[in-house]
Amino acid sequence: MEFKAAIFTSAVVAMVLCSSPAFAQKTKSPPAPAAVILPPSPAPAPAPHHVDLADLLSVAGPFHTFLDYLQKTDVLKTFQNQANNTKEGITVFVPKDSAFASLKKTTFANLTQDQLKSLLLYHALPKFYSLSEFNKLSTLNPVATFAGGQYTLNLTDDMGTIHVKSMWSNPKISSSVISTRPVAVYEVDRVLLPMQIFKSDPPLAPAPAPAPEVAKASDEAPSPVSGKSSSAKAKAESKSSSSHHVGVGIASYLILAAASAGGLLLLW
């Protein structure tokens, strides 16, 4: 009986403890972790601007000869893909039309299709370079071109004047057509001529025939001074002729007079 009473008492005490606030506080479940607030994700970078080299070269320059060769050989597509579909970008050295005209026409007409393609690829570097980077780039000479292999260039930066040296020409960069990553296009005043294609210095185009000389004013009309001289000379000649005629007349008269006198003496 006492055992049952002890069990009952223990049960009552346990019930009281479990129902007390202190016990409830101790057995309370841990609080949920605070929600983590993430910063807003940055907006995606804008897509790089598409550069159309054909449009660019057709309005700048004049670079019509170089552009015509690029289109005929499909090298334009190679440059276009490098410019818009790679991280490296491209640097192109574009000769003016006058640079091609300064060379004999057979210089390019006698090239094979592969040689012409290599010549055009030789005018580009497979990476974007701003003008400020050429000083450092010149320390890495010779610099590989898009033509690959031994088709290299030597670059020099002399106080901001940049020269692009090939075997048979050493043109300078005369202006920047565009220099915005990933495309740089620079104008040069001569065609780059590698020794892998040209074994000797290509001949220059013959000099144009000189224009006919315009007749001088002195050939068309006499000057006032020369006119006066001619008039004075004519008067002097006329005067001399008149004196000659007068002298001849007097001499003839004297001869006739002497002959007449002689006749009279004979008659007497």
Image: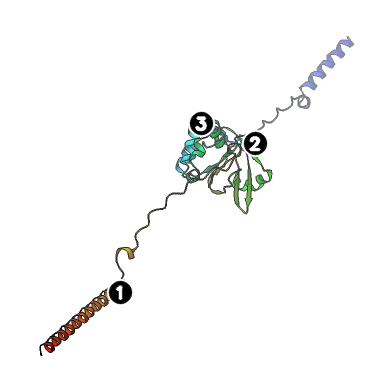
Kind of residue at disc 2: Gln
Q: Can residue 199 be spotted in the picture?
A: yes
Picture quarter with the N terminus: top right
Q: Can residue 56 be spotted in the picture?
A: no
**Residue 232 point in image, percent of width and height:** 28, 76
Tell me the tag on residue 74: 3
**Residue 243 point in image, percent of width and height:** 23, 80
Q: Is residue 94 above or below residue 18?
A: below
SS of the residue at dot 1?
Answer: helix
- Mark closest to the chain's N terminus, 3 or 2: 3
Q: Residues within 10 Å of mark 3 (few under 14, many from 20)?
A: few
Kind of residue at disc 1: Ser
Residue under the point 35% across and 62% down: 216
Kind of residue at disc 3: Asp
Picture quarter with the C terminus: bottom left
Q: Nearer the viewer, mark 3 or mark 2?
A: 2
Residue under the point 26% across and 75% down: 237
Q: Is residue 253 above or below residue 227?
A: below
Q: Are marks 3 and 2 in contact (CB under 8 Å)?
A: no
Q: Which residue lies under the disc numbered 2?
A: 150
SS of the residue at dot 3?
Answer: loop
Q: Nearer the viewer, residue 141 or 4?
A: 141
Q: Are marks 1 and 3 in contact (CB under 8 Å)?
A: no
Task: Write down the quadrant of residue 257 in the picture.
Answer: bottom left
What's the distance in space between the residues labelled 3 and 2, CA to CA?
Answer: 22 Å
What's the distance in space between the residues labelled 1 and 2, CA to CA?
Answer: 76 Å
Q: Which residue lies under the disc numbered 1?
A: 229
Q: Total number of numbered labels?
A: 3
- Mark closest to the chain's N terminus, 1 or 2: 2
Q: Are marks 1 and 2 in contact (CB under 8 Å)?
A: no
Q: Nearer the viewer, residue 153 or 250?
A: 250
